[in-house]
Image: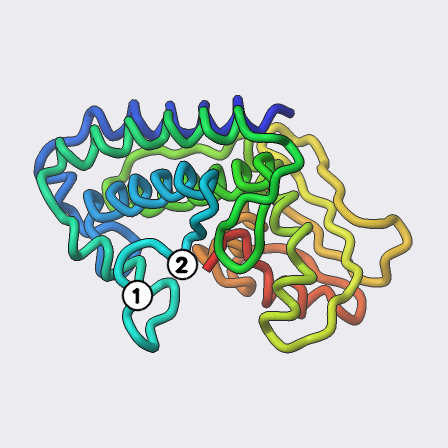
Amino acid sequence: MDVFADLAAEQDRLEQLLAGLSETEWATDSAAPGWTVADVVLHLAQTEEAVVASAGGSDLHALGEATPGANLDERMDSLVRAERTDPAVIFERWRTARRAALNTLQDADPQQLMPWAENGLKPRTLATTRLAEHWAHGLDITAPLGIPFPDTDRLRHIAWLGHATLPFAFALAGQPAQVVRCELVGPDGTVWTFGPDDAESAITGAAGAFCRVGARRMAPADSGLSMSGPHGAAALSVLRNYAA
């Protein structure tokens, strides 16, 4: 699967959706606390511009004015509040930024570590994080508006990201990394597997639920996912497929 093509496809879907929104819908509260639909798209524009800046050595922490004691989420929120404007301007800013970011990622040296949040990421991995963020914020936009946003096989990239970053997620939670196998069912019924066959612990179930838990859009208890072994439940509790 080509992550660059799938990132473009995910953004194409969102662009088509956004192009049909009314002024009232742009001003609707999204599922991202404190942000309207316009705010969510502004955040996506700002972070896509940060992808371009990362090619020059600037990381995500450099976005906006650093507020003493503020974490990355707080700085992202501050930046959105500082740059709110007309939805049409925001939409065009994101459309321009998302194309520039994709070009930057495709043109970069595949082995280059591009600064991002806590660690440098290779272009393909950074593209995967951008796909994950656009998908998660697509949920934030469409759910309050009652717009269908069906799962696609592009979730495989996001599921891979969640599994691949489990050691980092465990470390953030102050826990030792554990080996966990994931057996996830994609939207078309295909089973996607990540991790060694002989892992003591496993997570099984719907890929869409796994990705939603990793995006913190669904609680593990509500996911319908099955956890087994000594570390399955812990892995699902720390799972994350986003930067902050």
- Residue visible at 17% across and 30% down in the picture: 21
- Asked if the residue under mark 1 is in contact with the one under mark 2, i.e. CB atoms within 8 Å, the reply is yes
Query: Percent x, y for residue 156?
Result: 62, 36
- Callout 1: few (<14), some (14-19), or many (20+) C-alpha neighbours within 10 Å? some
**What label sits on residue 66 in the rendered view?**
1
Depth check: give the residue in front, 34 or 229.
34
Query: Which quarter of the figure has residue 56?
Result: top left
Labels 2 and 1: the sequence-earlier one: 2
Report the quarter where the N terminus lies. top right
Task: Indicate left or right for 36 with 215 as reference.
Answer: left
Of residues 162 and 50, the one nearer the viewer is 50
Q: Can residue 56 be seen in this snapshot? A: yes
Question: Is 91 rendered above or below residue 114?
Answer: above
Furthest residue to the right?
198
25 left or right of 117?
left
Name the image colouring: rainbow
The alpha-carbon separation of the residues under discs 2 and 1 comes to 8 Å
The image position of residue 158, as x and y in percent, is 57, 42
Q: Which of the 4 quarters of the picture holds residue 224?
A: bottom right
> Callout 2 environment at 10 Å: few (<14), some (14 to 19), or many (20+)?
some
Q: Going 28% across and 56% down the picture, which residue do you hit?
A: 64
Residue on which disc 2 sits = 61
Q: Is residue 153 visible?
A: no
Horizontal and vertical percent position of residue 36: 19, 50
Lateral position of residue 202 relative to residue 212, left or right? right
Image coords of residue 211 (percent x, y): 55, 48
Instruction: Describe the element under mark 1 as helix, strand or loop.
Output: loop
